């Protein structure tokens, strides 16, 4: 993994997490500035951010475990099979 | 052959990936050199000299005549460690750049190089072998493109991926935990998922956002919201208030106990209710209110919505400045909506503020049904132009009061300074259900004692209504003592109404004593079992209390204290009964000259009984519209409302 990719990944995830923290602070009725935003916005942001992190985490984990994603493996297998058929 | 110094410099450039230094050395001789078994490009790939490769890529991939050079020992050593299983193929042979990339497992670079490398296909068998050896899978070619098996990750890559994957999954768990916890702890504020308020700040925040809120514990609020259109469910918790909970309510509040704390500043908990208040309890113990707006209350100042199944417990004092009308009542200062099945219990002491047990004023659209008041109410007025009104349900009624019950003591006291000659006096009004009725009072019961005391003013006390102005009172029963007393002016008391002015009293009864007292020789007192002063309709009503004695200044009758005889001579009284002594009416005021009765003058029993000339008319006037009976007979009369 290149440094640029790492940097982008870290920056994006930090930005997304910061957004979530910000939404939490503004949505939850805690403190004087709490509750400025509807609490529903916290849940929507939370679900979206959690989904993003989960997808990213799972994707990297699958890569780490040496496999391809189901879709990726299917594409690769098809490509190899097609190649061998052409060779024959 | 390259010079030794140049070779060493070149090797250093390659090893350090120094593109600038490499540029100084780059010459056709260098670019075509093969060091041992490594062409220059292979060497660059082996040492991962990316910058040099990138900068001189086009030059490096060109096919040139080869110039054999001495090998670099370190390069051989490095290849030995990197080649792994593939080393078997290179005991002596040359390692082409394509093969080097294949051995090193740099698939993407291999694919790119394959596309531009001269006669690259000649290396395919070797590439196939290398990949098969390394990964157990061969390669394929589509057109001019290589299709390579997927490379396994390096240890470093695995480490990086593990770190990122762990970080992302940890972040996922954190975000998910915060979101789920927030959802479970706070809810969404929708009707299906109430916002759970655990703190005062959270409650205020939720109110301002008009969420559907459920209170999770007892709280104290120092402020409120302007308008609330959501649903507030108190869960039977206590909410202590120092200010109104909402200026305007268009939503619903239910199952909550409002406790008004000392120093509560505001006209009511809800200033304007257009919504629903259900099962709300308001507690105000040892509190003092000062006149704010025209209508003040504990729960609402102005109700045009619905209040039902609610409870008020109070011990309060209210003080007005006497400069304008002001009403105070536990549930609504002004009711133009519905108050149903509510209970008020406690004491109110007022000064120059009219008070009642449910609503200060019940407007034309107002409905008060099935309410119970257990209270001791007392109002004192110490100013000349203020008529204190004290009533069990509503001080003024223009709407409908149905099925209400009042117990306790209601006292209205006027203690005005001495009047000047041209000044007209005020009055003290007390009514068991309402003071001034222009609406309908139906099926109500008053068990409270009703007192009106006046000094420098009139006194009016009615068991159900004080003054019935063209209103309707029916099926009402009064069982409390009724007393009106003035030390300076007339006093008027009625078991149902002190004064019935163009109104109708039907199917009503009074079972306790009704008395009126005024100073002898200076003023009159009128006491009637049903009505003190009657200028309206009384039908099918009864009185079982004791009839007070009468003289030239004090007029008392079993049904009326005094009747107004109209020009038509038709007094609208019918089927009324009383169990005491005396006549149906204690006195008469004629509208027109009638057998020497001067219009506007009060002619009492004493006059009739002492003057034989009038004797024939006694039956016709003072015993008109009613009759004496016994309690037993009264109970058998089915048409008469009696319990």
Image (cartoon, coloured by chain):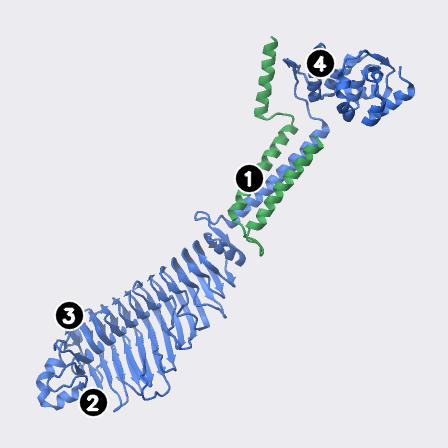
Q: Which chain carries label 3?
A: B
Task: Check chain identity for marks 4 and 3: say if they share one.
Answer: yes
Q: Which quadrant is home to the N terminus of chain B?
A: top right
Q: Which residue does the numbered mark 3 point to in the structure image?
A: B636
Asked if the residue under mark 3 is in contact with the one under mark 4, i.e. CB atoms within 8 Å, the reply is: no
Residue picked out by circle 1: A48
Residue B552, label in figure = 2
Viewer-proximal residue among B89 and B6? B6
Mark found first going from the N terminus, 2 or 3: 2
Q: Give the left or right position of residue A47, taking residue B431 as reference.
A: right
Residue B596 vertical placement versus B362 (above, below):
below
Image mark 1: chain = A
Compared with B53, B368 (above or below) is below
Q: The blue chain is which one?
A: B
Chain ID for green: A
Badge 2 and badge 1 in a common chain: no
Mark 1 to mark 4: distance in Å? 45 Å
């Amino acid at each position: 993994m290149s440094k640029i990719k790492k940097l982008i990944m870290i920056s994006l995830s930090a930005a997304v997490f910061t957004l979530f923290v910000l939404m939490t602070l503004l949505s939850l009725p805690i403190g004087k500035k709490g509750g400025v935003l509807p609490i529903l916005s916290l849940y929507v942001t939370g679900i979206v951010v959690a989904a993003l992190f989960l997808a990213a985490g799972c994707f990297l984990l699958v890569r780490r475990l040496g496999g391809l994603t189901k879709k990726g493996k299917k594409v690769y297998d098809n490509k190899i099979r097609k190649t061998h058929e052409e060779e024959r | 052959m390259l010079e030794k110094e140049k070779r060493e410099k070149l090797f250093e450039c390659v090893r350090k990936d120094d593109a600038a230094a490499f540029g100084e050395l780059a010459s056709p001789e260098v670019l075509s050199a093969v060091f041992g078994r490594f062409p220059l490009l292979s060497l660059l790939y082996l040492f991962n000299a990316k910058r040099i490769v990138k900068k001189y890529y086009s030059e490096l991939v060109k096919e040139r005549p080869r110039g054999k050079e001495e090998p670099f020992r370190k390069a051989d050593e490095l290849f030995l460690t990197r080649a792994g299983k593939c080393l078997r193929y290179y005991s002596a042979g040359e390692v082409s750049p394509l093969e080097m990339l294949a051995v090193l497992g740099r698939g993407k670079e291999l694919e790119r190089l394959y596309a531009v490398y001269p006669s690259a296909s000649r290396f395919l068998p070797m590439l196939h072998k290398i990949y098969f050896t390394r990964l157990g899978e061969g390669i394929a070619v589509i057109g001019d493109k290589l299709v390579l098996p997927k490379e396994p990750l390096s240890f470093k890559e695995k480490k990086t991926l593990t770190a990122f994957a762990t970080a992302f999954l940890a972040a996922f768990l954190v975000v998910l935990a915060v979101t789920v916890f927030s959802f479970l702890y706070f809810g969404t504020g929708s009707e299906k998922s109430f916002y759970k308020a655990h703190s005062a700040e959270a409650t205020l925040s939720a109110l301002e956002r008009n969420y559907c809120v459920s209170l999770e514990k007892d709280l104290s609020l120092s402020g409120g919201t302007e308008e609330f259109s959501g649903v507030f469910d108190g869960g039977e918790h206590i909410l202590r208030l120092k200010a109104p909970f909402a200026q305007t309510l268009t939503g619903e509040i239910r199952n909550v106990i409002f406790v008004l704390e000392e120093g509560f500043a505001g006209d009511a908990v809800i200033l304007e209710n257009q919504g629903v208040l259900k099962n709300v309890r308001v507690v105000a113990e040892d509190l003092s209110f000062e006149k704010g707006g025209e209508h003040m209350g504990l729960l609402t100042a102005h109700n045009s919505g619905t209040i039902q199944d609610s409870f008020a417990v109070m011990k309060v004092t209210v003080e007005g400045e006497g400069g304008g009308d002001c009403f105070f009542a536990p549930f609504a200062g002004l009711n133009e909506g519905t108050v149903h099945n509510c209970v008020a219990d406690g004491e109110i002491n007022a000064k120059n503020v009219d008070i009642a047990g449910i609503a200060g004023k019940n407007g034309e659209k107002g409905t008060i049904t099935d309410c119970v008041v257990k209270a001791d109410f007392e109002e004192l007025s110490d100013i000349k132009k203020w008529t204190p009104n004290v009533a069990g349900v509503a001080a003024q009624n223009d709407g409908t009061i149905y099925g209400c019950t009042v117990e306790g003591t209601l006292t209205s006291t006027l203690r005005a300074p001495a009047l000047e000659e041209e000044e007209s006096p005020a009055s003290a009004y007390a009514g068991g259900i309402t003071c001034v009725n222009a609406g309908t009072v139906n099926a109500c019961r008053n068990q409270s004692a009703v007192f009106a005391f006046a000094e420098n003013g009139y006194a009016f006390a009615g068991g159900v209504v004080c003054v019935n102005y063209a209103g309707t009172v029916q099926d009402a029963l009064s069982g409390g003592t009724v007393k009106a007393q003035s030390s300076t002016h007339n006093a008027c008391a009625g078991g149902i109404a002190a004064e019935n002015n163009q109104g109708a009293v039907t199917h009503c009864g009074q079972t306790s004593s009704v008395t009126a007292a005024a100073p002898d020789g200076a003023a009159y007192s009128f006491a009637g079992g049903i009505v003190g002063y009657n200028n309206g309709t009384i039908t099918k009503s009864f009185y079982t209390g004791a009839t007070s004695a009468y003289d030239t200044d004090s007029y008392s009758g079993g049904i009326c204290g005094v009747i107004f005889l109209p020009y038509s001579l038709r007094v609208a009284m019918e089927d009324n009964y009383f169990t005491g002594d005396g006549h149906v009416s204690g006195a008469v005021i004629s509208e027109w000259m009638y057998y020497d009765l001067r219009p506007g003058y009060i002619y009492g029993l004493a006059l009739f009984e002492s003057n034989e000339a009038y004797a024939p008319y006694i039956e016709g006037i003072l015993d008109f519209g009613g009759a004496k009976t016994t309690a037993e007979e009264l109970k058998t009369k089915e048409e008469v409302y009696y319990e």
